[in-house]
Amino acid sequence: MKSKDYILKALKEADDYLSGEDLARAMNISRAAVWQAIKALRQDGYHIDAVTNRGYRLNENYEALDAERIRSRLTDDLKDVTVSVLDRVDSTNDAIFREDAASPLPSFSFMTAEEQTAGKGRVGKSFLSPYGTGLYLSTIIHADDAPDPSLITMAAAVALKEALTEQSDEDVKIKWVNDLYFNHKKIAGILTEADFSQGKARYVIGLGINTNTPQKLFEKQALPTAGSLTGDISRNQLAADLMNALYRWIQRPADEILNAYRKYNLTIGKTIRFAKGDIEYTGVAEAIDDDGALLVAVEGRILRLSAGAISVEGSW
């Protein structure tokens, strides 16, 4: 059996990454020979992810991101936006801010990347973004085209929920304030950032969706609540569906955005835990008010959360 055939068989049978060192030892060949075999397999059309300190993994559901494929599926309202596809970037949020600063982009221009090396989550956390296993997308909206800032993340969450229903029957729900969950696992996160350095506000909405991320990768990173969609998801179609839906929802009146956000939310009526300052609380999420804040009943009083992390208890 040729080296590349052995490696292909091993990759197909593995349920996790295989290190180059282990493959070399098993076949009694050099690491350089392993790399040449991997290169040959890629030339044969196999998509093999390579992650430093982890090794190689065969991604049989891989579909390369393609700017023209995405653009061809956008609504006519978005025909003038800039669509960028990068192979690797630190953060799509940071990168699109840089691109817009160098040469202003039309609102709703967006960028995707196969991999983020420093994907951003809320409150300084990172968002795991392995190559080719998710949709990592950021879009920029200038102040004149933006709704009230408090509505931006909610509109994005509703748009993503509806875009996912175009390809999946999975019951994805929104968890206050900016995450989407399926089967008790976080499969997507949203980070909205604002910049006022150029005189007028510009907003970037970053969305990370795990479309085909191996669960063992989350386990290795000690991310027990993270998960991924299942089934065959076209990332190019998802990017277009997401942007079409986001454009529609950004134009909607505030009450429609709020009502849809409440409809798709899993948090209302659940017992939750959260912290305010140095004090931890347990209470029942009663409602989402007209500013998007979460109202929580705690020991006979109502506490209002406008931001922060919550944990949902029990089955949901």
Image (spheres, helix red, strand yellow):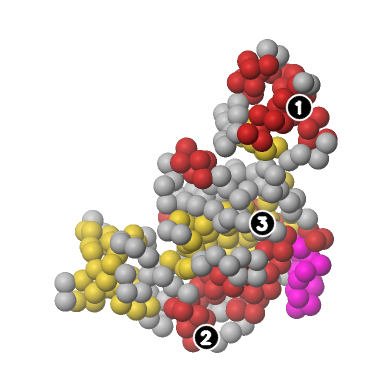
Q: Quadrant of the C terminus?
A: bottom left
Q: Earlier in the sequence, mark 1 or mark 3?
A: 1
Q: Nearer the viewer, mark 2 or mark 1?
A: 1
Give the secondary structure at mark 3. loop
Extent of the magenta region: 70-83
Residue 70 pos. (x, y %): 76, 63
Q: Quadrant of the N terminus?
A: top right
Near mark 3 (Cα within 10 A), the count class, few <14, some 14-19 or many ≥20, is few
Numbered badge on residue 256: 2
Q: Which residue is mark 3?
A: 232
Q: Earlier in the sequence, mark 3 or mark 2?
A: 3
Q: Nearer the viewer, residue 74 or 36?
A: 36
**Which three-letter amino acid code belongs to the residue tagged 3?**
Asp
Near mark 1 (Cα within 10 A), the count class, few <14, some 14-19 or many ≥20, is few
- Residue at 21%, 59% in the rendered image: 279
Give the secondary structure at mark 1. helix
Image: 58 above or below 21: below
Numbered badge on residue 227: none
Image: 291 above or below 174: below
Residue 76 included in the magenta stretch of the image: yes
The number of discs equals 3
**Which three-letter amino acid code belongs to the residue tagged 1?**
Asp
Numbered badge on residue 5: 1
- Residue at 60%, 44% in the rendered image: 130
